[in-house]
Image (tube, helix red, strand yellow):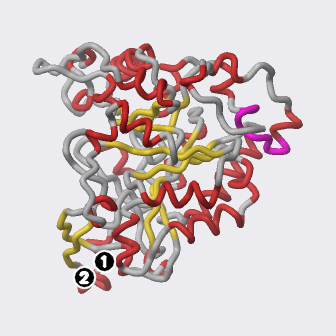
Amino acid sequence: MGPFPSPGRAFSRRRFIQTTAGAAALAALAPFAAATPALQAGRPLVFAHRGASALRPEHTLASYAKAILDGADYIEPDLVCTRDGVLVARHESNLIDTTDVAGRPEFAARRGKKTVDGAVHEGWFVDDFTLAELKTLRAVERLPLVRAANTQYDGQFQIPTWEEIIDFVAAESAASGRLIGLVPELKSSTYFASVGLALEDRFLATLQAHEYTRRAPLEIQSFEVANLKYLRTKLGRRANLRLMQLVVGGALRPSDVVAAGGQLSFEQMLTPAGMRDIAAYADVVAPQHRSVIPVGKDERLGAPSALVEDAHRAGLLVHTWTFRPENRFLAADFRDGKGENARNEAGSIAEMQRYIAAGIDGYFSDDPGLGRRAAGA
């Protein structure tokens, strides 16, 4: 099977899959273009943001397990690197907010400051720990005041490695009889390269070492550009593979662009010309969801922007981030008045459906169960 058809060439998920994949194809891990239920149903893809992070501490096997149980099409491991060169799942290099490291006296002396992606951070950093040391830590809820229910799981789970996640998802796929995608993000590539822990070749080696990642649905994402271009040269174009360019708004520039003295901003990347440039090396543009439908001064949703139309015309899919189910994260149209930290399932589903109507091809959700309900089972 060849590369994905371009949205600019009359791409249609409904026409893309004409037949239902049989049990034998699932057992054989058929390429996901022929097996992903979302494509068969003509609905957008649901990406479990850091797992089911609204319901379990992020980037734990428990969070991924909950996401899979709730029907996510893909789970997301953000990848960083230990001092001894092992890729593990954390949203950032700093461990202070998502582990119990601050309460570990044996590591007190390792607290420090580092500049990562142009910002100064203070805490404990993954690249100062070996994997064996990191495995002695336990995950905690990153937003304990917002997601107090998740704190009941504090201290229960280790930090998983990328290879452990691959094996776990492969096992869940075999148990459930459905293909489950992986959408890893390479975090802070320029920083890790600067400390002698470049991510890309380590990542490529793990892909090749595992049968599941050679054939299962895979989208590789980054806010940087050079690493995606490098991965494209190494991986080529495959039926089970997409590369995703993450984008934020405004005049900020990707870290690798800054390091190289370039001037390309994320704002420029979201212009029609910028998206044509992205399409030369990536398959997906992934902006913040408010770039697709912005909010006004009253914090209510306005009219959709031209972003989806421009991206499709350039031949790119659009996968947005991130939908969260608490009132504080919703546009004012969908809040229910029960408090900013209250979980608002109906409001969250309604908000996602507004964005689906704007033509997005997939979206990241902290609660993929709600994401599936919004998209249609």
Segment tinted magenta in the rendering: 27-35
246 over 14 or under it: above or below: below
Q: Is residue 377 visible?
A: no
- Secondary structure state at the residue bearing disc 2: helix
- Residue at 49 percent of width and 33 percent of height: 368
52 over 188 or under it: above or below: above
Q: Residues within 10 Å of mark 1 (few under 14, many from 20)?
A: few
**Distance in Å between CA atoms under marks 1 and 2:** 7 Å
- Residue at 19 percent of width and 70 percent of height: 122
74 over 83 or under it: above or below: above
Label placed on residue 108: 2
Task: Report the residue marked by disc 1.
Answer: 104
- Residue at 22 percent of width and 74 percent of height: 114
Can you name the residue that lies furthest to the right here? 24
User: Is 180 in the magenta?
Assistant: no
Residue 372: image location, x then y, percent? 53, 25
- Secondary structure state at the residue bearing disc 1: loop
Label placed on residue 248: none
Residue 49: image location, x then y, percent? 44, 42
